[in-house]
Amino acid sequence: MLQFELLTTDPASHARRGQLTLNHGVVQTPIFMPVGTYGTVKGVMPRSLHDMGAQIILGNTFHLWMRPGLDIMKTFGGLHAFEKWDKPILTDSGGFQVWSLGAMRKITEEGVTFASPVNGDKLFMSPEVSMQIQTVLNSDIVMQLDECTPYETKGHLTTEREARTSMEMSLRWAVRSKNEMERLQNPNALFGIVQGGMYLNLREESLQQLVEMDFPGYAVGGVSVGEPKEEMLGIMAHTPHRLPAHKPRYLMGVGTPEDLVEGVACGVDMFDCVMPTRNARNGTLFTRYGDLKIRNARHKTDHQPLDTSCTCYACAGSSGVAWEQGGREGFSRAYLHHLDRCGEMLGPMLTTVHNLHYYLNLMREVREALDVGQFAAFRARFKAERARGV
């Protein structure tokens, strides 16, 4: 089940405010979706995800197929009960993970043959197999199996001919994914994925043919695969707003806070990216006033929180009162620097909470700005504050 209601639009851009109703709950858009590859968002308790306002999270079809496997997942009736998450879940198709295996996989029209990265077993994934796995996972949003068109192929930039071949196979796989979902009588929502590399004419062809297939929702894939930022922004500016206005639009694997705000301006409703969690584990934190590297020596004696305006547990403690409003219960930069230097696991747990809270709060502020017709002013203020620096 999927229902999408368009609540308001921004007259100066393609930004829009919506509400997405799925089998396991309602999602307010635009939204950022934390990535939970193995059935967990790394280092974060499910309760913390609820507390910070996560409305929908991701699961990874490929990795959950490898471990714990479908036999175990069936005994729980799907991923929700297995990981104790009662809100919506989106699962990717496994296509990106198979693509990233490189020489370990062979792609044909039928599907992908590859060696398991877990035990070396020979495995096969097709559009049908991907739909069967995602049906067992019982995710609210299912992604079609596609081939992720690389930016470079065998040492050279992917040509238009190579990108076309890949895009056209993804379209055929979209048909097979849709047919298999119908055969399985899976009631969850299947999204088609626009491909075409960096070629706008191919993106347009892919988009038009997917729209004719009438999917419940659409995604833009094949970005953040090594291309220069300008080219990614070009696809983002071209494609999302051309998708049907009455259906949700998802930009896959993107990105920085700046990418999210610009993506909203381009008509995107849904985002996911490992950046907030991965960067947190590597000591890079996102704040209202720019990025902060907690490993820098200048933080060794700093009593301030990561972000004086932030109300996450790391910055404000259980009081939820920001430093700027007189709150003093959060953890200092000096303490987080110390935890990182000592390799204590509490360090990345706290920084992950902070980064995810920042992303989710950013999307909440975007929604609030759209609600009152102030998105343009918010966008300008956001850019100015981020450029100011920590």
Image: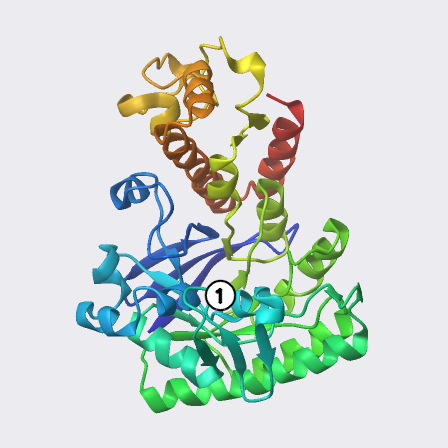
Quadrant of res 57 = bottom left
> Which quadrant holds the N terminus?
bottom left
Amino acid type indicated by mark 1:
Pro
Residue 84 in the image: state x and y as whole percent: 22, 55
Residue labelled with disc 1: 248
Residue found farthest to the left: 75
Q: Secondary structure at mark 1?
A: loop
- Which residue is painted at 55% across and 60% down in the image? 252
Q: Is residue 245 visible?
A: no
Residue positioned 60% across, 74% down in the render: 147
Looking at the image, residue 28 lies above or below residue 356: below
Q: Is residue 374 above or below residue 229?
A: above
Q: Is residue 160 visible?
A: yes
Q: How is the protein colored in the picture?
A: rainbow
Question: 264 and 203: which one is in front?
Answer: 203
* Residue 284, quarter of the rendered image: top right
Write the residue at 50% across / 42% down: 278
Image spot of residue 78 (x, y percent): 25, 68
Identify which residue is drawn at 71% across, 53% down. Answer: 233
Left or right: where 375 falls relative to 25? right
Count of numbered marks? 1
Quarter in which the C terminus is drawn: top right
In the rendered image, the residue lying farthest to the front is 120
Counting from the top left corner in percent of width and height, residue 265 is at 62, 51
Task: Tell me the crowding category of disc 1: few under 14, some 14 to 19, or many 20 or more residues within 10 angstroms, Cα based.
Answer: many
